């Protein structure tokens, strides 16, 4: 297991290097003069030229990338051109907020999605099954930002139960986490239902029932554990997506997370912050996938990570 984890970490290095090259190149190919955008509309030509030299924008792109990687390997993510603060400090303040939102959303999605999927699979073609699958279809199709605005109109403007934005007590977390969680719950419910239906057709489930085991034991002890591998896969991918894809939700609810920081930095042409934020999200995604692979071994003892890796 430890050897497998080390190999996965080593294999992630070229992936992260590729991400850094891609993001480094894309932000510099955005039309317009970045030095003028950073300096401001009314800046003097001398100040604009100083900004260009400070950010090495007058150097070839490969020289800029070399300096960036050299500083990165020394633990220096650079300094924000907008706030003049270290990028590491900006990310350290914002990332816990995004993590808090993503974890809350994933808890909501897991409880609703897995629960609805199990009930739908065990009561196939029932009224609950039909309603939950239609709801899941709507949840997958509905834009997240539209759902967030509807929640604000209902629970903040009309009913006045919850705040419409910002960050503070637990009440501020409910609406944005529900917005993210319900969309994810719809996908998890569909995957859980499909996986459970497939497992319930297996011979070992028939054998367990023939032994006189109660239906609850058959469903939750035998069927559910074997059906969880594809569900865990989706949860891992969705959790990584929540970390990087909460941009719209954080913007709608004025949540001070990485997503909102990334949008503001792109608009301000703040290259160091954009590069640092994307690299942090890429590292998080790689680590989440690694954790999911390790969880596989606990769900199914037949999966081993020795010299041959079982997919």
Image (tube, helix red, strand yellow):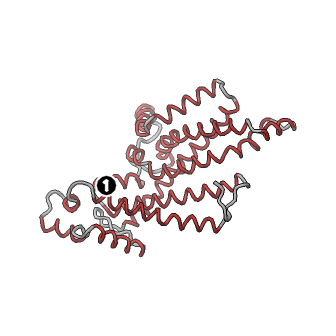
Q: In this view, does 70 lie to the left or right of 291?
A: left
The residue positioned 41% from the left and 39% from the top of the image is 145
Query: Is residue 52 at least partly visible in the picture?
Result: yes
- Up the image or down, 137 lies above or below 48; here it is above
Q: Residue furthest right?
A: 211
Tell me if residue 217 can be seen. no
The mark tally for this picture is: 1
Is residue 161 shown above or below 282? above
SS assignment at label 1: helix
Nearest the viewer among 289 and 98 is 289
Q: In this view, does 151 lie above or below 166?
A: above
Q: Pick the quarter of the image with the C terminus.
A: bottom right
Q: In this view, does 81 lie to the left or right of 165?
A: left
Instruction: Please state if 248 lies on the left or on the right of 308 as rendered.
Output: left
Question: Residue at 58% of width from left, 30% of height from top?
Answer: 133
Q: In which quarter of the image is the N terminus?
A: bottom right
Which residue is labeled 1 in the image?
A: 266
Q: Which residue lies furthest to the left in this view?
A: 45
Horizontal and vertical percent position of residue 275: 37, 61
Please tell me which residue lies in front, 248 or 297: 297
> Where does residue 49 sit, x and y in percent of width and height?
16, 68
Q: Which residue lies furthest to the top in this view?
A: 127
Please provide percent x and percent y for residue 253: 40, 44
Query: How many residues crowd around disc 1 within 10 Å: few (fewer than 14), some, or many (20 or more)?
Result: some
Give the image location of residue 97, x and y in percent. Answer: 46, 55
> Where is residue 128, by image quadrant?
top right
The residue that appears at 79% across and 35% down in the rendered structure is 215
Q: Is residue 265 left or right of residue 259?
A: left
Q: Pick whichever, 216 or 275, lies toward us.
A: 275
């Amino acid at each position: 297991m430890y050897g497998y984890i080390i190999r996965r970490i080593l294999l992630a290095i070229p992936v992260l290097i590729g991400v850094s090259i891609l993001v480094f190149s894309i932000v510099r190919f955005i039309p317009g003069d970045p030095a003028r955008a950073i300096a401001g509309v009314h800046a003097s030509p001398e100040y604009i030229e100083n900004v260009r030299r400070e950010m090495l924008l007058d150097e070839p792109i490969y020289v800029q990338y070399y300096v960036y990687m050299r500083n990165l390997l020394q633990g220096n993510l650079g300094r924000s051109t907008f706030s003049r603060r270290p990028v590491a400090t900006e990310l350290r303040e914002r990332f816990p907020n995004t993590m808090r939102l993503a974890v809350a959303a994933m808890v909501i999605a897991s409880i609703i999605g897995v629960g609805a999927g199990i009930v739908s699979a065990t009561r196939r073609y029932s009224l609950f099954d039909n309603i939950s699958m239609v709801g899941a279809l709507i949840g997958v199709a509905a834009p997240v930002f539209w759902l967030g605005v509807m929640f604000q109109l209902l629970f903040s403007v009309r009913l006045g139960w919850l705040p419409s934005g910002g960050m503070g007590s637990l009440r501020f977390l409910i609406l944005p986490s529900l917005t993210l969680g319900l969309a994810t719950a719809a996908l998890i419910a569909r995957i859980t239902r499909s996986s459970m239906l497939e497992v319930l057709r297996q011979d070992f489930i028939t054998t367990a029932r023939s032994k006189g085991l109660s239906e609850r034991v058959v469903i939750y002890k035998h069927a559910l554990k074997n059906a969880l591998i594809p569900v865990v896969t989706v949860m891992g991918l969705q959790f990584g997506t929540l970390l990087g894809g909460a941009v719209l939700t954080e913007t709608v609810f004025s949540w001070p997370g990485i997503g909102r920081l990334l949008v503001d930095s792109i608009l301000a042409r703040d290259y160091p912050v954009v590069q640092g934020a994307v690299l942090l999200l890429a590292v998080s995604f790689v680590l989440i996938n690694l954790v999911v692979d390790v969880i596989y071994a606990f769900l199914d003892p037949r999966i081993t990570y020795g010299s041959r890796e079982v997919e």
